[in-house]
Image (cartoon, helix red, strand yellow):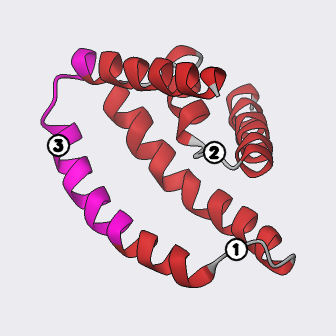
Amino acid sequence: MIEFASFLVLGLVVGLIASTLGIGGGVVFVPALVVFFEFAQHTAQGTSLAVIVPTAIAGAFAHGRRGRVNWRIAGWIAAGGVIGGLVGSAAALSIDPDMLRRLFAVLLVVVAVRLLSR
């Protein structure tokens, strides 16, 4: 029961952060699943991708109601994202889990530095 509640709280926190800041929830989900719930890196990434779908739909719907979504551009980006998702998933699954975790950490650091420097 505690684990169920912990996952529910994680979803709530990430949903709030992702929708408020407009970030992919994976930035929070993946490290949380690996660090706090001891998921393997590949499993954390796969799980994160699966739970981001409803989170993103809810956030996009709320922003869309206020006219804050360019649906035409979003459609084109989504089409590219589907192709990229298939290729990226195949690539991720072929990478050693420790190396994948390091690559993910480097990405987070690069994004943080870029955001802080603007």
Looking at the image, which residue is at 79% across and 69% down? 63
Q: Quadrant of residue 16?
A: top right
Upstream in sequence: badge 3 or badge 2: 2
Residue 47 is a magenta residue: no
Q: How far separated are the C-alphas under marks 1 and 2? A: 14 Å
Which numbered marker is on residue 91? 3
Q: Quadrant of the C terminus?
A: top right
Q: Secondary structure at mark 1?
A: loop
Which numbered marker is on residue 69? 1
Residue stretch in magenta:
80-99
Q: Quadrant of residue 65?
A: bottom right
Q: How far separated are the C-alphas under marks 3 and 2? A: 23 Å
Residue 72: x and y in percent read: 55, 84
Q: Amino acid at mark 2?
A: Ile
Q: Amino acid at mark 3?
A: Ala
Q: Secondary structure at mark 2?
A: loop
Circles 1 and 3 in contact, beta carbons < 8 Å: no
